[in-house]
Amino acid sequence: MRRFTLISMTLGFSTLIAACGTSTPVSNGIATMTPSSAETAVTNAIKAASSVRMVITVVQNGVKSTQTLDAAKTGGIRTLQVPGGTATILVSTKGAYLKAPSTVLSNNFGLSKTVAAKDSGQWLSFPSGTSGYYSLANGIGMAALAQEVALTSVKRKTHPQINGQAVTTLEGSSPSGVLDLYIPDSGQLLPLAGSINVKGSVVTFAFSRWGETVNLAPPANSHPFALSSTPPAASNNTSSAAG
């Protein structure tokens, strides 16, 4: 199964979280750090965080798809908006679960039309430890996110304020390509947003809900995937960066 990397899709900056409150922001020191020290501090802050929401959108060949990832330490929930409908993947320590309409199951996950029609809109389960579980779980969770946004050969770039909030831009190489991360100059050293070019796709994304609870309770009334323990090979028709 082709895995969806965290930076496979993009998000516009209109959803960025605005700086709130009227008190004077307290500097977190990133503006005076060396690029390498700043990257280390940001990576450590991400690793220490318990959860985050990452909204990503990709535009490739005029086709747009959106992904929302609610990442936690022990799993996460990935929601994919693709032509034909919405696919939801939930991963916990107990198993991985997939739900999508028949068109998406057929076009993006490779099920036959007959099987896709039977399983349309139902939660399919893949027990923890099976190949199907690992296929769906790949790229979900805080550890995977930290790896995807880790930068090497880092340099600092100028960037205008985001929603009135001063930011520092760190640019460097990531597993998916050259990545820009936008870090607030005050508050926690956690990214507000980022952007990347992936094989000709336009990719942007934003972070929010740092530290909020992610409900990873197994879906009620799920049933084992009938064909095998391995889900069909998933593909995102709007992006070749699925890894």
Image (cartoon, rainbow, N blue to C red):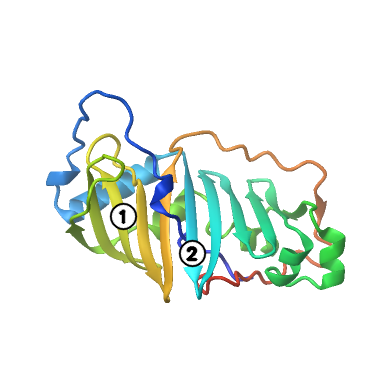
Q: Residue at x 36, y 50 (%)?
A: 193
Q: Check contact, mark 1 vs mark 2: CB within 8 A.
A: no
Identify the element where label 1 is drawn.
strand
Sequence-earlier tag: 1 or 2 = 2
Task: State the image coordinates of residue 156 (x, y, percent, origin top left).
Answer: 18, 57
Left or right position of 174 against 35:
right
Q: Residue at x 78, y 63 (%)?
A: 102
Image quadrant where residue 24 sits = top left
Image quadrant where residue 210 sits = top left
Q: CA distance from mark 1 to mark 2?
A: 17 Å
Left or right position of 171 against 60:
left
- Looking at this view, is 220 or 167 the one in front? 167
Residue furthest toward the top? 23
Q: Which residue is mark 1?
A: 181
Q: Which residue is mark 2?
A: 58
- Do we see residue 71 in this rendering? yes
Identify the element where label 2 is drawn.
strand
Left or right position of 69 against 111:
left
Q: Is residue 98 above or below residue 198?
A: above
